[in-house]
Image (cartoon, rainbow, N blue to C red):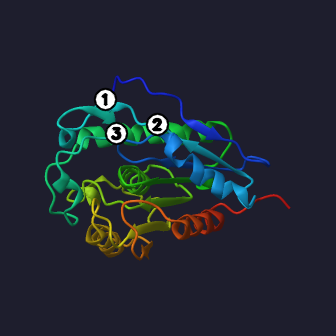
Amino acid sequence: MASIRRAAPMVFKPSGRHTATVIFIHGLGDSGQGWADAVQLWQRGNRLHEVKFILPHAPAIPITMNGGFSMPGWFDIKSVDALSHTTGTGPEEDASGIEITREYIYSLVQAEVAAGIPSERIVIGGFSQGGAMSIFAGLTAPFKIGGIVGLSSWLLLSRTFKDRVPADTLNKDTPVFMGHGDRDPLVLYPMGMATEKKLTELGYKVSFNTYAGMQHSACIEELNDVEEYLLSRLPPQDK
């Protein structure tokens, strides 16, 4: 994966002065385009008018649970069981793939910082596999970020997660927004709850939001809640 060429992310520019950025990471088999409608919804009210949205595209990689055939993915998933266990009891994970994607996410953050956006004004978020990457990359980041969003997701490398967090724990107080449908047939609801429980026990500030009847998808209520979270973490700086 390290040598795979990546397509440039989709970018949605702010309507006002650029003071903040959201990097939102799609799920397995999708592309950044799959979350374009959500971004347009978040931008429609013009309350996030200072926020730039970046939607990266995963490279096509062999996915074991897909019979080894390639599809857009941020890391390999060995089996369906990897998406249905509770935290800490799952099968072997693709640690190297996860680490490579984490470094790519950090490169996107660093590019924004180089352009003048403080890392504290950058939120990392995503859905499913992308949400799992967001939680992992955000909480283990060697720099302070503004927030973390994990939708229909779970904690990666949970058995060794604590050891992967930098000693200075820069994001110990960074609020994490989690959203999960209680009818999710893929990333099971108990898996999301187990993630919230483990992170809370480790001292992180997690808001876990349940959406009744929602399966492995996003609903308008959840998207509205994400917008409120983004507004709370990235308030406008213009006067």
Q: CA distance from mark 2 to mark 3?
A: 9 Å
Camera-near label (1 vs 3) is 3
Q: Amino acid at mark 3?
A: Gly
Badge 1: how crowded within 10 Å, few (<14), some, or many (20+)? some
Quarter of the figure that contains the C terminus:
bottom right
- The secondary structure type at the circle numbered 2 is loop
Residue at coordinates 65% horizontally, 60% vertically from top-left? Answer: 234
Question: Left or right of 182: which side holds 11?
Answer: right
Q: Which residue is mark 1?
A: 1
Q: CA distance from mark 1 to mark 2?
A: 14 Å
Position in image of residue 190 (x %, y %) = 26, 72
Q: Residue at x 51, y 49 (%)?
A: 24
Amino acid residing under circle 2: His
Q: CB of mark 1 within 8 Å of CB of mark 3?
A: no
What amino acid is labelled 1 in the image? Met
Q: Secondary structure at mark 3?
A: loop
Q: Earlier in the sequence, mark 1 or mark 2?
A: 1
35 or 132: which is nearer to us?
Answer: 35
Residue wearing tag 3:
73
Q: Earlier in the sequence, mark 1 or mark 3?
A: 1
Whole-percent x and y of residue 130? Answer: 40, 49
Instruction: Indicate which label's residue lies in the foreground, 1 or 2.
Output: 2
Indicate the quadrant where residue 72 lies: top left
Q: Secondary structure at mark 1?
A: loop
Other residues around mark 2 within 10 Å, as few (<14) / some (14–19) / many (≥20): many
Residue 183 vs 131, above or below: the answer is below
Residue 119 visible here: no
Q: Residue at x 77, y 48 (%)?
A: 15
Residue 57: numbered disc: 2
